[in-house]
Image (cartoon, rainbow, N blue to C red):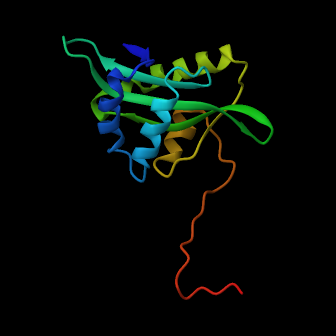
């Protein structure tokens, strides 16, 4: 079952899942989610294992309405699906598309360092650039 989370009931479970995402700023994402629970410009979708009495979050997608290159976009802030439940990823993604269309949003963006080819192949994303980083060392001197 895929639900749009509107209260804090499932946030702790999502917090634990975020730990599986490499290089994800867990505290920042959870803080953003908590503030945006009832904001129409944010959505938290969760796949809930509903075959048991206990409702367990097995995957989630968190997106916000943003502006990129002058276009409104559904910006995917964080997403994760437990490997055993990966077959439901497309269903969660389809719900994001439906939510975006209701808001006249025709574009989705994501920055990922993990499996970018999967997003291209499975969901039709295209490469538009490369996120690069460089650490500044104590030896750097730019004037």
Q: Quick check: 107 left or right of 71? A: left
Between 57 and 8, the residue placed more toward the observer is: 8
| x 47%, y 47%: residue | 115
Vertical order, 68 against 132 (above or below):
above
Vertical order, 19 against 81 (above or below):
below
Position in image of residue 130 (x %, y %): 63, 56
Between 79 and 29, the residue placed more toward the observer is: 29
Q: Residue furthest front?
A: 35
| x 43%, y 49%: residue | 24
Between 134 and 113, the residue placed more toward the observer is: 134
Q: Quick check: 123 left or right of 45? A: right
Q: Residue furthest right?
A: 70
Position in image of residue 81 (x %, y %): 37, 32
Q: Quick check: 7 left or right of 134? A: left
Q: The N terminus lies in which quarter of the figure?
A: top left
Position in image of residue 28 (x %, y %): 46, 45
Q: The C terminus lies in which quarter of the figure?
A: bottom right
Vertical order, 30 against 130 (above or below):
above
| x 41%, y 29%: residue | 60
Position in image of residue 58 (x %, y %): 31, 27
| x 31%, y 35%: residue | 83
For the image, the number of numbered tags is 0
């Amino acid at each position: 079952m895929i639900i749009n989370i509107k209260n804090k009931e499932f946030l702790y479970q999502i917090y634990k899942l975020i730990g599986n995402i490499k290089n994800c700023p867990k505290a920042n994402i959870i803080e953003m989610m908590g503030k945006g629970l009832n904001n129409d410009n944010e959505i938290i979708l969760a796949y809930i294992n509903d075959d048991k009495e206990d409702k367990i979050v097995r995957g989630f997608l968190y997106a916000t309405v943003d502006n990129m290159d002058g276009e409104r976009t559904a910006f995917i802030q964080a997403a994760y699906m437990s490997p055993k439940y990966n077959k439901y990823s497309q269903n969660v993604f389809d719900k994001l598309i439906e939510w975006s269309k209701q808001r006249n949003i025709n574009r989705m963006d994501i920055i990922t360092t993990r499996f970018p080819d999967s997003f291209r192949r499975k969901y039709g994303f295209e490469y538009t650039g490369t996120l690069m980083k460089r650490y500044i060392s104590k030896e750097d001197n730019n004037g």
